[in-house]
Image: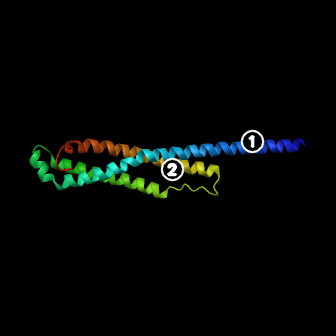
Amino acid sequence: MKNVVLSIFLVLIFAAACTNKSDSTQKLQDEVIAIHDEVMPMMGTFAHNSIAIDSILNNFEQIKADQPDIDTVQQREALVSLKSSIDQASEAMNDWMHQLELDFEGKSNEEIESYLQKEKTKIEEINVQFKEVEKRSDEILQPYRNTNVQ
């Protein structure tokens, strides 16, 4: 009888531990998705900014006529660099989304947690990258916001 009670007790402890891991796994997955949801709206802004950069670069003659003091060489380099940064950030996000696997059938809680922790680290890095590009975009594109070029 003592062994039966001990066995039941151990099964209950194991079940409780699994439930806790499952809860922590779900929490971790929710954190990953929350970061994704924070980054995702910037994709639209980046697409818009990329189009604006193309328009600005195609109309530098008009900009130079309207703003003769502008250093078009420096501005062109900044815009080309910004467009490259936007493309790299967007590509990183697209790659991450395509590679993300949320079907955990047949995996242990430890495997799931390890995977989700790695994915959380990746999406946090993308989030930082996006915020840096967003800040640079605001700074570089600000002088063009009130022109007819965009």
Q: Residue at x 83, y 42 (%)?
A: 6
Marks 1 and 2 sit apart, C-alpha to C-alpha, by 30 Å
Identify the residue shown where x is 23% and y is 42%.
142
Q: Is residue 109 left or right of residue 120?
A: right
Q: Amino acid at mark 2?
A: Glu
- Residue 61: percent from the left, percent from the top? 12, 53
Q: Amino acid at mark 1?
A: Ile
Q: Secondary structure at mark 2?
A: helix
Q: Which quadrant is the N terminus positioned in?
A: top right
Q: Residue beneath label 1, please?
A: 13
Instruction: Please state which of the two labelled residues, at mark 1 or mark 2, is closer to the viewer.
Output: 1
* Residue 112 place in picture, x, y as percent: 60, 51
What residue is drawn where x is 38% and y is 46%?
A: 129
The residue drawn where x is 30% and y is 53% is 84
Question: Does residue 18 appear left or right of residue 74 in this picture?
Answer: right
Q: Is 58 located above or below residue 128 in the figure?
A: below
State the residue in front, 121 or 106: 106
In the rendered structure, the answer to whether residue 95 lies left or right of residue 64 reads right
Which of marks 2 and 1 precedes in the sequence? 1
Residue 106 horizontal/vertical position (percent): 64, 57
Front residue of this view, candidates 38 and 96 = 38
Residue identifier under label 2: 119
Marks 1 & 2, CB-CB < 8 Å contact:
no
Position of 138 compared to 119: left or right?
Answer: left
Q: How many marks?
A: 2
Look at the image and name its color scheme: rainbow
